[in-house]
Image (cartoon, rainbow, N blue to C red):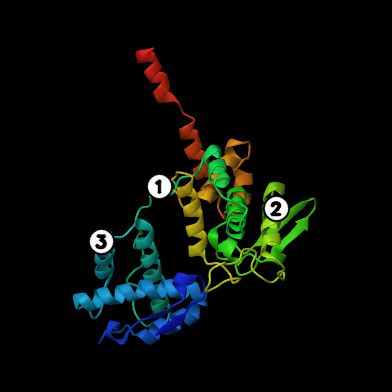
Amino acid sequence: MCIHTKEGADMNEIITLEANTSIQNTGISESMFYKWLSFIDASEKTQATYTRAIKQFYLYLQAEGISNPTREDVLTYKEKLSADHKPATINLYLQAIKLFFRWTAEQGLYPNIAEHIKGAKLAKGFKKDNLTSTQAKSVLSGIDTNTLHGARDYAIIALMMTTGLRTIEVERANIGDMRTMGDSTVLYVQGKGHTDKDAYVKIPRTVEAAIWEYLTFRGKAEDTEPLFASISHRNGGGRMTTRSISRLVKEAMIDAGYNSDRLTAHSLRHTAATLNLLNGGTPEETMQLLRHANLNTTLIYSHALERANNNSEYRIADAIFA
């Protein structure tokens, strides 16, 4: 079974369920999985993700000699995953399994053995830290904007810091996506899970100036070309990948002295949300900025700031030691 993917360098491969991973002498076949993928009408990236997840489950069943999996087998598999996988990964694997067996049951092909199986418990809060305003300034000031490379990286990081864009949204952006809305310059973006560029973020004037400085450095380009282009020998002028965007952000952070596993490109999204709330933005405004589907996701930032501003420990220490 082959599924070709297009999004990102790490996805430019053929995801294959090899013949030897098939479950022999069982009611579950690879053809059933093919039909399911066609039924859910998922994007190529989602299909690749589900293929990886189902492949791992197939390999587990084969290794355990299980020909007709039951609910208990799914629960045991979940427990096995918890030994060396993060909760988010476990839930991704389980989601694919649950969707697959829900479909097999609806089609009368195989019982829904994954029904009502709960996912792994996720910790509240975010896995990545944000930058303070001082740290954000330090990261930007450490970039040499006198080169094409530096001008591009500065523009990307400044844009992500102020708008909360994800790396995939930066990757997908074209020059022509920069437009005007009222008195503002905006960038239309194709958000997570969206097929169209149906939302926009406002570009602050200082960031807009940095983008135009980079585009001037870059030279003539068409509106249909990527807003931020690769400068590598192999892909010069082509669309950057999420991996390369993440790498340049990480390198800029390290150059500024901030080398932590909890600081990544996604930290810039957290930085935008946190600084907006700290400087008068409401949770509702921050939700709109980040294009969250649910306010509860945005409120995680608010709750984190409430705890950060709670100085109970200092008051207690003052009572004891002052």
Report, in whole angstroms, how far the alpha carbon at label 2 lies from the one at label 1.
Answer: 29 Å
Q: Is residue 265 visible?
A: no
**Quadrant location of the N terminus in the rendered image:** bottom left
Task: Give the residue at mark 1.
Answer: 260
Q: In the image, residue 75 lies at what x, y percent?
A: 27, 65
Name which residue lies at 38% across and 58% down.
Answer: 88
Report, in whole angstroms, how far the alpha carbon at label 1 lies from the one at label 3.
Answer: 30 Å
Q: In the image, residue 285 lies at what x, y percent?
A: 64, 45
Lateral position of residue 270 relative to residue 31, left or right: right
Three-letter code for the amino acid on which mark 2 is drawn: Glu
Q: Which badge, 1 or 3, is on the more N-terminal residue?
A: 3
Query: Element type at marker 1?
Result: loop
Query: Element type at marker 2?
Result: helix
**Label 1 neighbourhood size at 10 Å, few (<14), some (14-19), many (20+)?**
few
Per the rendering, the mark at residue 208 is: 2
Task: Give the residue at mark 3.
Answer: 79
Q: Nearer the viewer, residue 213 or 49?
A: 213
Three-letter code for the amino acid on which mark 3 is drawn: Glu
